[in-house]
Amino acid sequence: MKLALRLGAGAAALSTMTVLAACGGGSSGSASSDNGSGKKSATVELAIASAVIGPKEEVATYSVAKEEGYLADENLDVKTINTDGSVAAIQAVASGSADITPADASAILAAREKGVPVVAVGGLVQNWPWRIATLPGGKVASAQDLKGKKIGVISLASGSAPYARAFVQDAGLDPEKDVDLLPVGVGSQALSALESGKVDALALYTQAYTTLELTGKKFTYLPNGDRFQGIRSLAYAVREDTLRQKKDEITRFLRASYKGLLFSAVNPEAAMRDGYRVFPAILSGKSADERVKNDSTILETWVKSAVPAEGAPESFKDWGAVSDAEWNKTADYMKSSGTITKDPDLKKLWDGSLLKGANDFDASAVISKAKSATK
């Protein structure tokens, strides 16, 4: 199956981005007086990849940064727009509808290959979040057992499809001949497909499995091979002209976001309550007290994908850093999955020049505030 068929509408959106980029559409922020912090007030437009109806990156970064005063410290007013996935979020940035977005690396790489002038300025998810899961005691106990089997993916346009293909390829199987990929969505729909035998395994992200495990369900996870170590997922991306024109504002936004992420790593429950205040739709009509225990566990799972795999929060540093080796490994993975066709120009794809300023904050103060926050 060709890439255009797998990505569907997403690929069409990417094709239009080159046209949008050529139309200009500069960043929409403004700057005026300071608030006593010495920083001029500014507006930053944030594109969110999907509606926030559950614990995910916007809670750990934006919600906490807003509710804990980190955006106010930077004298930033952040406006948000919702989009339909990472490709659409990149499109919003490319068209000038937004200044910055946390998008999947695959969307950034694909856009860059098409000549869209977007650039990654800070990493977010650094630990590979995708896993293959089966039912305990089932017929699939190893990757090789997937031959002739059906794997449930979120959709053929999601990141789970190329991951599933790469996983079976890594096991020495032919992803086009030896397995079938069936769209099953996430949540109860995916679980039903697995339990009914419609599929023999699932290819989901860890956060989705945690949600199901909280209902009492159990899974057996097949180990990922070495090829998946070091592949990057979400990263913050901006237009090239936004980077030039709003370098200070974007640096301040990243700093507030990384402070929010550190806070979330220390106290996910307090972070989740911040999320309810900013995105009340997460509650789905229930009270915060009814939801917070499970939602905090789900958020904690996501946070673990975005912070160092080892060490306590006190040891975390170099927020947002992505090495050339990690970008190259990510690009190799995307080439093998058909998302891109050639090696990217890292000098155009990645600009880490803002990270020194983004890391210029008192981590101990953030940790202390998180530890003392009311759960």
Image (tube, helix red, strand yellow):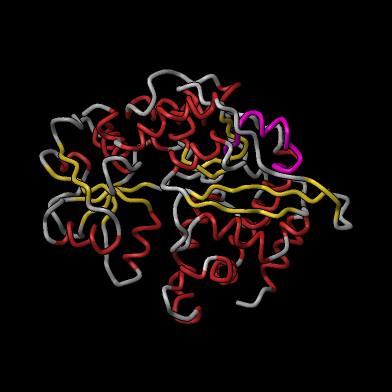
The answer to whether residue 325 is left or right of residue 284 is right
Give the image location of residue 310, x and y in percent.
Answer: 55, 51
Q: Looking at the picture, does residue 55 appear above or below residue 107?
A: below
Image quarter hosting the N terminus? top left
Report the predominant secondary structure element of the magenta stretch. helix
Q: How many marks?
A: 0
Give the image location of residue 166, x and y in percent.
Answer: 30, 34
Q: Looking at the picture, does residue 299 appear above or below residue 149?
A: below
Which residue is at 64% across, 77% downward? 374
Which residue is at 58% across, 43% downward? 98
The answer to whether residue 345 is left or right of residue 229 is right
Which residue is at 35% across, 32% downward? 11
Q: Which residues are magenta?
A: 237-251
Which residue is at 61% across, 39% downward? 122
Give the image location of residue 322, x and y in percent.
Answer: 58, 35
> Which of 241/374 is in front?
241
Give the image location of residue 137, x and y in percent.
Answer: 16, 59
Image quarter hosting the C terminus? bottom right
The part of the image, by quadrant, that contains residue 169 is top left
The answer to whether residue 131 is left or right of residue 369 is left
Q: Looking at the picture, does residue 58 appear above or below residue 7?
A: below
